[in-house]
Amino acid sequence: MSAWQNHDLSDVPTGRELLPGGNYTFEVVQGTAKFGKFDPNAVEFRAAVVGGEFNGRPVFISYPDPDKQDWSLTAFKRLTVALGVEIAKGEGPIDYLGRVGGLHFNMPVSIVKDKEGVDRQRYNILNPSPAKN
């Protein structure tokens, strides 16, 4: 008998409470940076809310291929400024994010409606700022 057979999925929630819109402090989660599975030139990492009711809530941040989305370089550079640690000459983004794991930054979060009218979380990766802690 499988462990799955011992569980009733009818009462298992499928949704996740969205973060209310506002400005949150996030921590770069050590060891989570990687190149994208579906876009090998995208940079992805996990951050977690620091403090408050949503402390520890993970968010997933992705910077697209800068050859396809030129704003991606600007957004990533703004993250380095917000973290207060320069990226070293020749250092790649994955190594950099590994080096700054545990550091904090602020980022605006909003709720937007998708094409079907469903509320979605939007992380404003273009406007990170230094953490105020």
Image: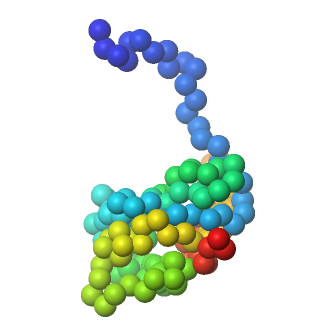
At 38% from the left edge and 84% from the top edge, which residue is drawn?
Answer: 87
Percent x, y of residue 86: 43, 86
Which residue is painted at 49% across and 70% down in the image?
103
x and y percentages locating residue 39 in the rendered image: 32, 64
Q: Is residue 120 visible?
A: no
Q: Nearer the viewer, residue 129 or 122?
A: 129
Q: Is residue 43 left or right of residue 109?
A: left
Residue positioned most to the top: 1
View extreme (bottom): residue:
89
Question: Total of numbered circles in the picture?
Answer: 0
Q: Residue 125 location, x and y as percent? A: 55, 72
Query: Which quadrant: the N terminus?
Result: top left
In the foreground, 80 or 10? 80
21 up-or-down from 118: above or below: below
Q: Position of residue 81 (x, y in %)?
A: 52, 84
Q: Is residue 116 above or below residue 72?
A: above
Q: Is residue 104 left or right of residue 113?
A: left
Camera-side residue of 21 and 30: 30
Is any part of residue 76 visible from this angle? yes
Q: Kindly indicate the quadrant of the structure image that contains residue 109.
A: bottom right
As drawn, which residue projects farthest toward the front? Answer: 133
Quadrant housing the C terminus: bottom right
Q: Looking at the image, is 24 positioned above or below residue 78?
A: above
In-image side of 94 versus 55 (left or right): left
Residue at coordinates 55% horizontally, 80% vertically from top-left? 82
| Residue name at image x 54 percent, y 69 percent | 104
Colour logic: rainbow
